Amino acid sequence: MARVLVLLMFLFGVVPIANSEQISNDFLGSWEFYKMRYRGNLLDPINPNFHMYFIFHDDRVNSIIYYRDDQTGFCERSAVYQYDGTRKVLYQQVVWLNPKNADFCDQDPDMKFGSESWGGFDRLGADIGLEVPLSDESLTLLWRPVEMPPIPGRD
């Protein structure tokens, strides 16, 4: 799989960012979204039926998988990533979409082949935080380490 992703990086022009480094072992593994930080306030997710997981692999690939208890289907994608540890910025480019993704996944810009994103990313105690731009503000999604549970319908 790593060779295929390197080829995809070459074909789609993924350019290394300055001071790029691999995610340290502290970030590798599975993470569950469980809180948000907005304007200094720590908030629970808006929808308690929403489950989202961020998985970092040691081959510069990460995956996001999410689903809702009250909705059939799931969304999953893999991206090549680069991390600038000096600036605490994570760059991602989507290189794979699960062919079993639900129809509603295409409404999410992060579930589009080739889409790119940059965001603040850092370790926050036992958690990791990923900044998401929100108009002229930002929202930080907080993730805690977790053993990956089975995803309904994913097989």
Image: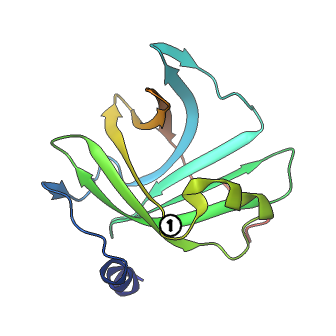
Where in the figure is residue 66, as x and y percent of width and height?
Answer: 66, 52
Query: Residue 19's spot in the image, x, y percent?
Result: 12, 54
Quadrant in which the N terminus is drawn = bottom left
Left or right placement of residue 48 versus residue 30 in this view? right
Q: Is residue 151 visible?
A: no
Judging depth in this view, the residue of 108 and 152 nearest the camera is 108
Q: Is residue 1 above or below residue 107?
A: below
Q: Which residue is depicted at the point 86% across and 56% down? A: 72
> Residue 111 occupies which quadrant of the picture?
bottom right
Q: Residue at x 69, y 77 (%)?
A: 99
Q: Which residue is mark 1?
A: 78
- Left or right, 21 with reference to 48: left
Residue 6: % across, % down: 32, 81
Q: Disc 1 on helix, strand or loop?
A: strand
Q: Nearer the viewer, residue 138 or 76?
A: 138
Q: Quadrant of residue 106?
A: bottom right
- From this view, report whether residue 35 is shown above or below residue 82: above
In the figure, is residue 107 to the left or right of 21?
A: right
Q: Is residue 25 visible?
A: yes
Depth check, front residue: 51 or 139: 139
For the point 64% across and 72% down, the residue is 98
Q: How is the image coloured?
A: rainbow
Q: Quadrant of the C terminus?
A: bottom right
What kind of residue is marked 1? Ser
Front-most of residues 119 and 155: 119
The residue depicted at 50 percent of the width and 67 percent of the height is: 78
| Identity of the residue furthest to the front in this view | 136
Q: How many marks?
A: 1
